[in-house]
Image: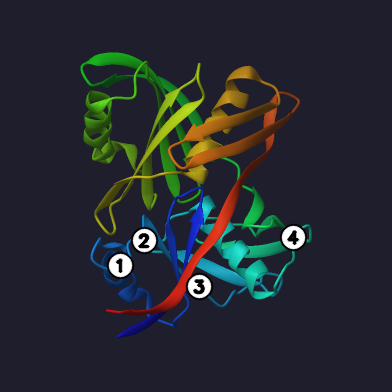
Amino acid sequence: MEVKFIKASPTQNMTVLVESSLGREQYAMVASRLMAYDHVFAEQVGFIEAAEDANAWARLQMMAGEFCGNAAMALAAVMAWRRQLQPGERLEVPLEVSGAGELLVCAIEAKPLGYSCRLRMPLPLSIEQEMLWFGGELLPAAIVRLPGIVHLIVDVRELNRSTKEAAEAAARQPSLLQGEGALGIMLYRKESGELEPLVYVPGTDTMIWERGCGSGAAAIGAYAAYEAGRDVELELKQPGGIVRVQALCEYGKLASLTIQGDVHISAEGTAFI
């Protein structure tokens, strides 16, 4: 099987976008192969489909039907690249995205290298606070449910091997999922703004320490605004770079959530499955 693809780097969260028309029943198999080290190699795979909404330019369907903010920004950047957007020029790209029940609009500005993308995210369905046994100790945690993905935010003192092992164990707890397509464990050092994101997708049985996670960053921004009851702007330092989050409140409640990061187009070609 030949598969046409584009590879993009939203904050080094390496993403393969498949352009070839395939049946959704093939997505998990194709995604697993493309992600492999001996193949195209990436952290996640999305499939470009025709949109049902006439106002959307395209639909992004992730490999297991989950929601992904970084992949949405990657697809918007591809749209800008196809239109040969020049440095300094701007564009707004409306997209359908799996896991999101509303049209998402990504604002793009072309830079000399790559694109600056700002995506308005869907608001969380719920935000809960709890104490969690994590790596043998009781730690404060938050559970933020976004459409299609749930994030567990754990405030850790150190980002080390033991906390990563605890995160991997926590990711497989079935009680955390309530029908979402993916689960994120966000190891967060609030005082320094550092974030190490782990994402588990049960549908493809993939667990990856990502270089960057857009929806995870959004979840942290939403939780911070929820805690404070006011507008919050954060710069989250992930392994692949900085993702900026803006959470705006009205009357003490979250009203708007956006993420911003840089996207580079890495490759375009044909993969053999």
Task: State left or right for residue 151 relative to residue 79.
Answer: left
Give how far across and how far down residue 122 sits, in percent.
60, 47
Mark 3 or mark 4: which comes first in sequence? Answer: 3
Task: State left or right for residue 31 relative to residue 87.
Answer: left
Which amino acid lies under the numbered mark 2 shown in the image of this protein?
Ala
Structural distance between the alpha carbons of marks 1 and 4: 36 Å
Residues marked 1 and 2 touching at CB (< 8 Å):
yes
Q: Quadrant of residue 189?
A: top left
Mark 3 or mark 1: which comes first in sequence? Answer: 1
Give how far across and how far down residue 239 sits, in percent.
43, 38
Which amino acid lies under the numbered mark 1 shown in the image of this protein?
Ala
Neighbourhood count class around disc 4 (C-alpha, 10 Å): few under 14, some 14–19, many 20 upward: few
Give how far across and how far down residue 242 sits, in percent.
55, 38
Give how far across and how far down residue 44 sits, in percent.
38, 58
Determine the residue located farthest toward the front in the rendered image: 112
Q: Which residue is mark 3?
A: 48
